[in-house]
């Protein structure tokens, strides 16, 4: 693997200066968290979902985030309209395959989105990415190291086949565009004990992708920044409730020194 | 009344070990809180609501929670499909009769759910339970002691008639399956000063019912644990905002010693 | 300008004693925040949105808040039904023109609401109010002082033309009924760094309008109280996350002494 210089703070500064609009069609559980992570990063969230306005709204955005966590067929139709508008404008479309594999509807709609529009980045946890890749991966009972290795291959193959960037989250996160693969080793176990961190990670990635055309690089930087703040928040939190609020504080206050000191990305 | 041994911590441990899936069709105001209370208890929330997938999702769940707080006729149709799937699988269906009595639509849809599917546990505040029982109870101006007494009778009659467990919340909470009645005396006034605690209580009950077939016993344990954490959170909270976040912390950190010391359930 | 006595605490006490029902049809991003600000002020939020029940629900309310942040055509139909019911009962209808100007759908639906129902108070930020007034105002690059001056005129004209109260928020907030104009100088920059404060301000205004027929006076008091609590919360917050929770605490704990000392309203 070649060593490349990663300057996540430079992207964060770009976000704070240009305040890009990040358009979401997301789920109803974490819609506030998706919007707020964009906001505290310094960008501007827009959560319009009516099929009558999503195409127009996507035109004023710098990236589009789709999240199927509480999908309905009608909602996915609006997602497709938004994605096609984003494709036309040339802004990146990020798909969180939240819950892929749980029901036939989710699988079907995921593949429709992937086949009928151009998705530039697919993000999911290990089992969701495995499902989308068509692999039957047994994730239980396999130790983290092995999963990471197997998953890197699966993610890379999926990225090549779909000509997109793939982000597979877990204890270590894999980000790959099929050529270059980043392993992000930041994060904290408390992130898995509270609702919303998975969706927030996707929205953070969407925000970084709004200011940087190298989507794998942007995603690696975004995930790392998000998880560095999580490590900081976990230090003084009394549990998942206060952790979540402090997480917003620390993301808002991220500076170059902290990022450079705490960042753990392998490439 | 006979004295029975109540070991709420044993159920909590069962939740943390088996991590049951708790499927919700709930309201849009507190959907995050409903999911997050399940999560911090150690279980796994799923909030799918599309009529095309709810039957399938209910099949991977260990309990189903319905909450009509922001109902529409279409949403109640999805609830019925989910409930019938849950009935078929034999997992408990919990109904929060949120706002029953406020409009004709709410009353109508509550009774449809009760008549067309098997609801295993009905939960509401005193006036909601009274409404569902068909009783015209005047709740204003009646002191808490008298209400508690009257309500216990009303709840017991409703439980017998509907062959289900009934939970009526108030200053003291009544849990009854028509035979055995529990009075839960935990809780704190701050719970009534912030949005979401009522819905969270229902989701906590749903989580305990996912690991224990005696639903009245499970509900009494679940409510008590939730309210013990609320008592702890209230001690250091500056108001309803920080109270809510600390509540999640204390639920997450509940241990046997705290529960045994603070639990106030009469049976 | 004439000097009038402003006693915001008197209105707050009226809210806490009469606990008015504030009915909302709002957006899915901040629906919890809209409900919770009403709750911590001491009133009773109701968030029913089904077209089948909104007319009935509005009849038990003391004010109605509409917010188009995540509108759909169907949702706006329910808003119209609710507004007409509120008009019939004679309770104030408050419209948050959230995102007006961003898409054709938003503009169209805003004007439909204004033309087909009686809106008693229109609230938006400077660019939203300018859009609704039909003025082509350039808000970027204009310094705050000049905007405030121009905006006061635009807001006043709009209020006169639409025979309603207009609230234009910014670094300083303008509240006018076309005759009397209030400038609210409370607030803190952190309010703009977290999602929800704009919607919460509208819901606070709606709550104060539920107990006071002079809507401009009520709105000035409501905004000022909300922003005083924000100033207090900002003092000890570590960032936007903890700020938001403390904001609820301070609103809940607002007392006469604090309000009288910190209030900065010019009339």
Image: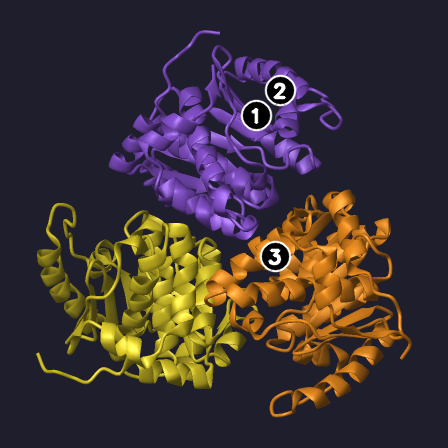
Chain colours: A yellow, B purple, C orange
Going by the image, does B120 lie left or right of C176?
left
Question: Does mark 2 fall on the same chain as mark 1?
Answer: yes
Label 1 or label 3, whichever lies nearer to me, is 3
Q: Is residue A43 visible?
A: yes
* Secondary structure under the numbered disc 2 in the rendered image: helix
Report which residue position mark 2 lands on.
B148
Which of the numbered marks, if any, corresponds to residue B172? 1
- Same chain assignment for discs 2 and 3: no
Tell whether label 2 touches label 1 (CB within 8 Å). Answer: yes
User: What residue is drawn where x is 55% and y is 67%?
Assistant: C234
Tell me the subunit letter for badge 3: C
Residue at horizontal 62 percent and vertical 20 percent from the top: B148
Rendering quarter of residue B205: top left
Label disc, if present, on residue C250 of the rendered structure: 3
Mark 3 lies on a secondary structure that is helix
Quadrant in the rendering for residue C169: bottom right
Q: Which mark is residue A149?
A: none
Query: Residue C40 location, x and y as percent?
Result: 64, 50
The answer to whether residue B28 is above or below residue C236 is: above
Q: Nearer the viewer, residue B188 or A229?
A: B188
> Residue placed at 41% from the left, 61% from the top?
A246
Q: Residue furthest top?
A: B2
- Residue at mark 2 to residue at mark 3: CA–CA distance: 33 Å
């Amino acid at each position: 693997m070649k060593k490349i210089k990663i300057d996540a703070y430079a992207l964060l500064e770009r976000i704070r200066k240009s305040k890009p609009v990040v358009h979401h069609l997301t789920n109803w559980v974490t819609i506030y968290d998706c919007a707020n992570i964009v906001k505290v990063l310094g960008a501007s969230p827009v959560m319009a979902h009516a099929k009558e306005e999503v195409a127009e709204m996507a035109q004023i955005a710098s990236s589009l985030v789709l999240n199927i966590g509480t999908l309905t067929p009608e909602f996915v139709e609006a997602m497709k309209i938004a994605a096609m508008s984003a494709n036309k404008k040339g802004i990146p479309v990020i798909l969180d395959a939240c819950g892929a594999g749980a029901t036939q509807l989710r699988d079907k709609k995921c593949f429709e989105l992937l086949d009928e529009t151009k998705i530039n980045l697919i993000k999911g946890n290990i089992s969701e990415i495995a499902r989308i890749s068509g692999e039957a991966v047994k994730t239980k009972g396999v130790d983290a190291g092995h999963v990471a290795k197997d998953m890197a291959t699966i993610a890379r193959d999926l990225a090549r086949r779909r000509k997109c960037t793939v982000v597979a989250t877990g204890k270590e996160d894999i980000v790959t565009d099929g050529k270059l693969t980043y392993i992000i080793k930041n994060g904290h176990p408390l992130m898995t004990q509270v609702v919303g961190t998975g969706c927030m990670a996707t929205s953070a990635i969407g925000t970084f992708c709004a200011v940087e055309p190298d989507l794998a690089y942007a995603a690696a930087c975004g995930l790392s920044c998000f998880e560095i703040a999580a490590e900081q928040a976990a230090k003084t939190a009394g549990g998942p409730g206060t952790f979540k609020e402090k997480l917003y504080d620390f993301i808002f206050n991220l500076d170059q020194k902290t990022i450079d000191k705490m960042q753990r990305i392998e490439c």
